[in-house]
Amino acid sequence: MKKMNIGLIGFGNVGSGVVKILREKKNFLAEKIGVEINIKKICDKDILSKRNVSIDKGLLTSKASEIIDDPQIDIVVELIGGINPAKEFISGALKSGKNVVTANKALLAQNGKELFALARDRGKNIYFEASVGAGIPIIKSLREGLVANRFNNIFGIVNGTSNFVLSEMSANNRSFPDALKQAKEKGFAEKDPSLDIEGIDSAHKLIILAYLCFGKLVSLQDVFVEGISQVSLADVNYAKELGFEIKLLAIAKKDNNELQVRVHPTLIPRSHLLSSVSGVYNAIYVSTDLAGNLMFYGPGAGQFSAASAVVSDLVDLTQDIKAGLFRSTLNIIEDRSVKKLCRIEDIKGRYYIRFSAIDKPGVLAHVSGILAKFGISIASVTQKERSRSQIVPIVMIVHEAREKELRLALSEIDRLHVVREKSIAIRIEEL
């Protein structure tokens, strides 16, 4: 039986999961694919700490060059994350004639165009199924299963930490700080969770999804990003009263000849499938011209979920190498109907708005007058109960408005002497 040697760079949580799968399912995989996947070398800066899998100490090294420069290694698996030195390791592997498997969404979002071009030039591939949605097979589905389709929209709940926090707020009436504390205690949030709760992680994943769907590899600066740290428990509960759940959505949406790429808290109707995605689970909802609307759902994090996707990529590559084939993983066709990216200030949509104002006659008339001045009409309005401080929340849903006019209106409203806190506006998405 043919043997395929791999070198693993990164022996952390996911890396050790990959090793465990390849060890425990060695015969099972070999029987299915007709190839023995052999771990020839494992590199990590920490080769002394114990993992949940036992290995021959002779496999370990702290020098990535022992993998990159080894002519007997066919595939390099990069699982260290971050930009550097991961970029150098992947570039070096490709230049050494090796195929690459990675889960590194940040690197692909920032340097994907360069790395994919290098891979094509060298007749090699970069597989990256685990970069979005962990074990959810979204990359292969978009690239292969839906190859005949054109894409209209893609909406993703792609960050487990943020989704857990919002789910706790909704289901258990926790404040944002308490829900985030719970996420940390359960190991669902990093010590510094800012990349997750501020939407950057979701933006990296959105860039990859948008590239696969629309052939546009946008930069992080082109993505509008707004996190969930300003979402209050009051907003979550008011949204529920109005028939919505608040989720952090990654959105790539084609509107005529423009492409929207944005990440932000969003009100989703409670009748929609995405609204029921809770905890650390991820879901990607895709709208296509042939297959219709599809939703891909599953755990978006976890050792074996992500490791399963890595092993799937390894199997695909071993089959190609065994057959002597080069199948470009990125036969991306640019959607030429998309002429430009839509700026956030030009996006039109409905909004949930909460004002905090002194409880006195005429306040609602002042607020409504300013909205009308900017061409914004009110669909519904609720003035909540009076508080001890005499400050009451006014909750509105407004009809479709352009973001620029809405922000100008809110800026003027916030300057009213009767308005005591910065107004909150959360977008409502028509799915």
Image: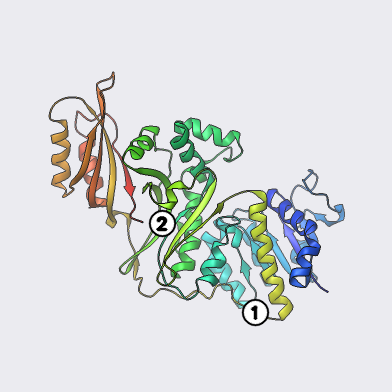
Residue plotted at (58% across, 68% down): 115
Evaluate whether residue 39 shows in this view.
no
Vertical position of residue 417 compared to residue 426: above or below: above
Q: Residue furthest bottom?
A: 324
- Give the secondary structure at mark 1: loop
In this rendering, position of residue 169 left or right of residue 321: left
Residue plotted at (24% across, 41% down): 410
The residue pinned by badge 2 equals 251
In this rendering, position of residue 304 left or right of residue 241: right
Residue 68 appears at what percent x and percent y?
Answer: 74, 65
Which image quarter: residue 85? bottom right
Tell me which label, 2 or 1, sits earlier in the chain.
2
The residue pinned by badge 1 equals 326
Q: Nearer the viewer, residue 148 or 362?
A: 148
- Give the secondary structure at mark 2: strand
Q: Nearer the viewer, residue 270 or 305?
A: 270
Residue 133 appears at what percent x and percent y?
Answer: 55, 55
Mark 1 crowdedness (10 Å alpha carbons): few <14, some 14-19, many ≥20? few
The quarter in which the N terminus is drawn is bottom right
In this rendering, position of residue 69 left or right of residue 388: right
* Alpha-carbon span between mark 2 and mark 1: 32 Å
The color scheme shown is rainbow
